[in-house]
Image (cartoon, rainbow, N blue to C red):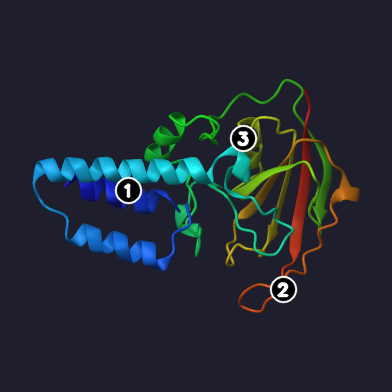
Amino acid sequence: MRFFALLATAVLSVVVRADSDTAASAASAAASAPSSSAAALSASSFANATLQENLSNSLSQANFYGAPIPPWEVGCHPGWYYGNDPGAVVGWTIPWLLDALICDILDLLPFCLHCPVPKPPPKNGWVQTFSNLNGATQASDYLTYGLVDTIQDCQTMCLGVSGCAFINTYHDVNGKNGSPLLTCALFKDCHDASDADNKGGQTQPDGSVDYITDSNGFCLQS
């Protein structure tokens, strides 16, 4: 039973992308798994090892923490979700950074994104550099991007990513399968409205065209 619990947790927790063949193989393996406790222990260890390998590959710094294609390019997808409603992530399977199993595994992996731990506000706080624009930041100092519920969640993510000094949150539909969640893009350097020149326009698989609203930028003051 522990194997099935772990397998279910892994499937629900990872809100790492999986294709239909992988999903079918996993379902077939689960259906034919032996019921003995020894076999279940072996299977659960395998499930954890597989999840660990997927997370290690996906959420490494070299892979831009799961989002190697920046959010202003066609073919992008968010690398992670930090918020309270994993059910709002539709169509993608990405790591949910508030899940205990995911967070425990990430804590064991060097050079990977870790689940953020809320910290006291920085001493000098955040300075808003622009607000409510119809364009998003695109710049060469891009670090990663994911999905969040609130601006404060995005700020918390930035505090947990090495080198992060700027966040850009906005609503859009590029690579999000219609998700209503905020896009949270992280950068090394501070940016102002002059860099918010991603105006959307990317055509989506369903034929719709990306647009951007409510774009806000905040610079971390050291």
Label 3 environment density (alpha carbons within 10 Å; few <14, some 14–19, many ≥20) = some
Residue at image x 57%, y 50%?
79
Marks 1 and 2, the one that precedes in the sequence: 1
Q: Which residue lies at the image location 79% right of the left edge and 27% below the top edge?
A: 221
**Residue placed under numbered mark 1 in the picture:** 9
Of labels 3 and 2, earlier in sequence is 3
- Of residue 3 and residue 15, the one placed in the foreground of this image is 3
| Residue 155, visible in the rendered structure | yes
Quick one: 181 or 3, which is closer to the camera? 3
Q: Quadrant location of residue 201? A: bottom right
Percent of width and height locating residue 11: 36, 53
Q: Is residue 68 left or right of residue 189?
A: left
From the top left corner, tell me how far across and down residue 38 is, in percent: 12, 41
Mark 1 to mark 3: distance in Å? Answer: 25 Å
Q: Position of residue 68 (x, y in %)?
A: 64, 50
The answer to whether mark 3 and mark 2 are in CB contact below 8 A is: no
* Residue holding disc 3: 156
Q: Neighbour class for label 2 at 10 Å: few (<14), some, many (≥20)?
A: some
Between 71 and 20, which is closer to the camera in this rendering? 20
> Relative to residue 111, is residue 27 drawn left or right?
left
Q: How many marks?
A: 3
Q: CA distance from mark 3 to mark 2?
A: 30 Å
